[in-house]
Amino acid sequence: MEIVRPEVNTPQEADAVEGAYINSLIADSTSAIPDPDRWIDEAVHRNVFLTTTDTILAWGRQRSIFPMLFATACCGMEVISMSVSRFDLSRFGMDVVRFSPRQADVMIIAGTITWKMALATRMIYDQMAEPKWVVAMGACAISGGTFRESYSVTPGVNRIMPVDVYIPGCPPKPEAVIFGINRLHAKIIKGTMDDPMLSKP
Amino acid sequence: MTVITSGEELGKKIAEAIPGSVVSSDKTSVMLESKSLAQVAEFLKNTPGLDFNYLNFATAVDYIDYFELVYRVLSMEHNHSLILKTRLYDRENPAVPSLVAIWRSAYFQEREMFDMFGIKFEGHPDLRRLLTWEGFQGYPLRRDYL
Amino acid sequence: MPIKTEPFYLNLGPQHPSTHGVFRLRVQLDGEVIVDVEPIIGYLHRGIEKLAETRTYTQVIPLTDRLDYVASMTNNLAYCLAVEKLAGIKVPERAEYLRIIFSELMRLANHFLAIGAFLNDCGALATPLIYMWREREKIVDLCEMTCGQRLLFNYMRVGGMSQDVPVEFMPALKKFVAEMPKFIGEYEQLIKQNEIFLARTKGVGILPREMAIDIGASGPVLRASGVNWDIRKKDPYSIYDRFDFEVPTGDVGDCYDRFWVRMREMRQSVRILEQAIGQIPAKGTVWADVPQFFRPPAGEAYGHIEAPKGNLGFYVVGDGSIAPYRVHIFPPSLMNVTALRDMAIGWKVADLIIIFGSIDVVLGEIDR
C-alpha cells in the first residue's frame, strides 16, 4: 500500500482527497491479505546465511524498545496506567515514550481504529524506522471488538498494517499487556529470517 | 427542579404571536410547522418571561414516514424547559431552517444531523459532514441504512 | 516595498500527544499567532447510536461505557435514568446511594486525570500526572473490587446495580475518603501558587459568560465563566437533593478558573461521599427485579446528569419492543469545544494547547 500525495490547495480539497483515500482503503479490505514475505525471493530464502551477530543485536534491541504513544480510545487509559509508577514499563526498557514515530520502535495500537483514522495510522506506521513492531492492544484493534458491525470501524488493524502481537481484552489489564510485551521480546530474539516459525514452509 | 413548561399553554402563546406555526401541542412538547421553526425559536429566546437562552440538545428520529426533529430548550434564568418538535415528510430532500444564528450550540449538532440523516439546514454557515468522511455513501442513522 | 505574508496552515493531530485522543485541529497561523482554528472530529466515530438500535436495552449499557471512558460509570447512570423514566421503574434505596457513591468517585477520577493532563499540557511533563494517577489508581481499585473491571465497569443496570458491593468495600471507601482531603490539599499547595503556572494560565483563553451560555457549554467550563448551573442542584436526579454541597464557580472564565473550579469540585465530591457513607442503608436489595428482556412502553424519555465534564443526556425512544428505537447521546465535550475558535484566536500555538487542555474533552464522547 503506497501513499499518493496529490497537489491540494484548499482545506476542502484536502478533505476530498482524504475521503477518496478512505474509500479506497475500504475497497482494498474486501480482498485477501497478501503474504507479507512475498518480496523475499526464493534464492534469498535458501542461500543467505545469518550469523549469531543477529542474536546479539536482537538481544540488545529487546531491552530498549521505545514505544510510541498511539492511544486512540479507552485502551489508552491503560497505557498511561502502565507507564506510571504502579506497573512501571521502565522495567522493560520502555520508559521513554516517544511522541514522534521516527524515534519509536514499537507502536502499541491502543483503541478502536476507524476508517477515518486508518489513513493517519498507516502514515504513522510508514514513518517509523526499521526495525519496527506493532502491538494490537484490545479487542477493537484486533478485530473491531464490540464495534465490529459498525459502518465506520475497521475489522481489525491487520487490514491496514502487519501486526506482531495481539493482546485480547476490553481493555486488557496492565498485567496482560506486560505479558504481551514479554511475547514481543521473545519474538524480537527469534524473529529473524531463518526462524522456522516465520519462514515459508 | 427544572419546571417542564406546559406545551399546551405555551403552544397557545406561540400561535398568537406567530399564526399558523403550531400544529399541535401536548403536556410536554409543542409540535411546530417546520418552516416557522426559526421564527418560533427567536420568539422563545427574546420574549421576556420565557427567555429560553440555552439549547440543550437537538436531534432527529427517523420514523420512516417522516423525520421528527426534537429540540430541548432551557431557560437558565427561570429554570424551565420545553421540547420543540417538527416533522419533515420529504424523504429525498428534507430541509429545515437553521437555528445557528439564534443558539450557537446548534452548530455542531446540525452538522451531525446533516451527516447522519441527510437533513439540510438552510442558513447553516458551514454544512459539511462532521463525523464521517467526505465521500461517505448514505446516511447512517436512517432506518433503511444497513 | 511592503512585506507580504501568506496564511500558514498547521495541522495538529489526529495523532498528537496533546490532543487527548484523536482530535484534529486545522490551525491557520500568521507567524505564530492564531488566526483561525477549525476542529475536525470523527476519528473515533464508532457508530454507537446505530449499534444501540440493534441491541436490547440491557445490551446497550456496555456500549455507553465506551463513551466517556475516563469516567465510564456516569454514562451508565445517564442511560439507566432515561430508560427507567421510559419504563417507570423505581430504584431501591441502597442502589440509589451506591449510584451516588460511584458517580462521585468517577468525578474524582475524571478530575485527577483532567488536572494531571492539563498540567502536562502546560509543560510540567509527567510529574503531576504521576502524582494524580496514584490517587486515581485507588479509585480504580475500589471499582475493581466491586465489579472486576478496571476501566469499563458495566456495573449499573436498569433498575439498580448488577450486584452488591463486597464486604471489604465500605471500610476501603471510608479509608479513601478520610485521607483524600490531605492529598487534595497537597496538590493545591503544589500547583496553585506556582509562578510559571499562573503566568501560563491567568487571563488565557477567556470564555465570556454570554458566549458560554450561547454555545451550550456545561460542567466546569460553564461554571468557570461565572454561571451557577449544576444539574445536581438545579434539577436533582437520583437522590442528590438529600446532600449538602456547594457549587464552585469562577469569575473570569480563563484557563486558571477552569482548573480551580475542578480542584474545588473535588473537595465537594469528598463531602458528598462522606454524607453518603453515613446515610447508606446497611442492608437491602440493590436491583428492582427487572426482567432481562423487558419491554418498556412506546414513548420517549430524556435523562440527564451532571457528568464530570458537563451535562450528559440520553434521549431514548422506545417502540414497545425489547430494543430501543433510537438512542441519542448528548455529549458535554462536543458543546464545550464549539467555542475553541473564539477562545484561541489571537493567542500563540503553545497557548492553544493549554486552552484545549483546560476544556477537558474526551474523544470517545465527542465522536460516539
Image: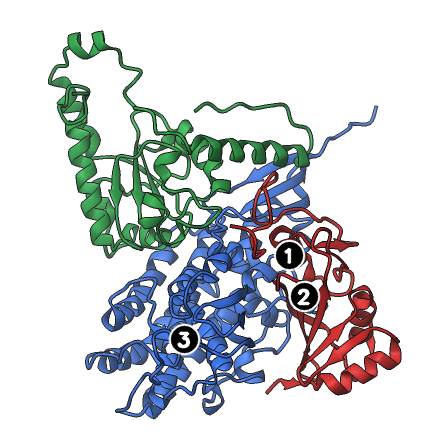
Q: Give the amino acid at mark 3.
A: Ser
Q: Nearer the viewer, mark 3 or mark 1?
A: 1
Query: In which quadrant is the N terminus of chain B drawn?
Result: bottom right
Between A97 and B47, which is closer to the camera in this rendering? B47
Q: Residue at x 40, y 67 (%)?
A: C61
Q: Are marks 1 and 2 in contact (CB under 8 Å)?
A: yes
Between A136 and C2, which is closer to the camera in this rendering? A136
**In this rendering, position of residue C278 left or right of residue C46:** left
Q: Which residue is mark 2?
A: B69
Q: Which residue is mark 1?
A: B113
Q: Give the amino acid at mark 2.
A: Leu
Q: Is residue B55 visible?
A: yes
Q: Which residue is mark 3?
A: C103
The reply to whether label 3 and label 1 mark residues of one chain is: no
* Residue A149, x across and y down, in percent: 42, 50
Answer above or below: position of A125 versus B139: above
Q: Residue at x 42, y 47 (%)?
A: A72
Q: Residue at x 74, y 86 (%)?
A: B8
Chain C, which colour? blue
Q: Which chain is in green here?
A: A
Q: Secondary structure at mark 1?
A: helix
Q: Residue at x 28, y 79 (%)?
A: C173
The reply to whether label 1 and label 2 mark residues of one chain is: yes
Q: CA gap, disc 3 to disc 1?
A: 30 Å
Q: Give the amino acid at mark 1.
A: Met
Between C228 and A127, which is closer to the camera in this rendering? A127
Q: Are marks 3 and 1 in contact (CB under 8 Å)?
A: no
Q: Which chain is in red here?
A: B
